[in-house]
Image (spheres, helix red, strand yellow):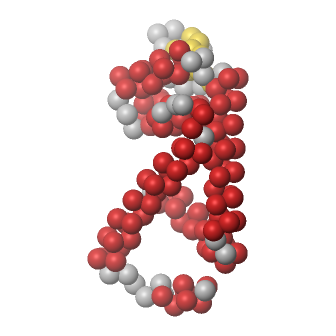
Amino acid sequence: MQVFLLISYAGDMSRAERIRTADELTTLVAQLSRRMRTASAGAEITPSQQSVISRLDREGPATTAALARGELVRPQSMRATLAALEERALVVRAPHPTDGRQVVFSLTDEGAHLLRTGREARRGWLAEAMETHLSPAEQRAMTEAVPLLRRLVES
């Protein structure tokens, strides 16, 4: 299987092949994302709320403006997302340490717990699906694709 993959992708892809691959990846990533959300459906938070609490977990406390920039949304949209998270006690606001005009949002223990259990559910579903439906060689191919996908996301 690996030899086939190396041979079939050894040459340069045409623009049409890259566009076809991009179309397929777009569809598959969206389907995978929806499938993973259903694996942790008990959380009942929106994808944007999930992304914000993940960012707060990864990067620590942040202002509305910083979160909006990081999530590529308008500050007004971020305020609405934060209000919904605050209402559920998943985030808490505090005065900014150096600028009294601003507030910073942090993840609460309840928010961290929700994030952790959701990740465990998604990770468990995906690991089980890979083990059940992919051969060892295909599992290795998936592992090798992760750095490539990360590079695309970070570009």
What residue is at 70 percent from the left and 30 percent from the top? Answer: 113
Residue 35 horizontal side relative to residue 69, left or right: right
Which residue of the protein is positioned furthest toward the top in this rendering?
100
Above/below status of 113 relative to 135: above
Above/below status of 96 relative to 74: above
Quarter in which the C terminus is drawn: bottom left
What residue is at 52 percent from the left and 31 percent from the top? Answer: 45
Residue 52 seen in the current view = no
Tell me where residue 104 sits by quadrant: top right
Image position, residue 11 (x, y; %): 43, 88
User: How many numbered discs?
Assistant: 0
What residue is at 52 percent from the left and 62 percent from the top? Answer: 149
Image position, residue 118 (x, y; %): 64, 39
What residue is at 32 percent from the left and 81 percent from the top? Answer: 14
Q: Nearer the viewer, residue 106 or 53?
A: 53
Above/below status of 39 relative to 49: below
Quarter in which the N terminus is drawn: bottom right
Residue 57 horizontal side relative to residue 84, left or right: right
Image position, residue 151 (x, y; %): 51, 60
Image position, residue 81 (x, y; %): 45, 25
Q: Nearer the viewer, residue 104 or 30?
A: 30
Residue 113 horizontal side relative to residue 77, left or right: right
Tell me where residue 62 sits by quadrant: top right
Residue 41 horizontal side relative to residue 19, left or right: right
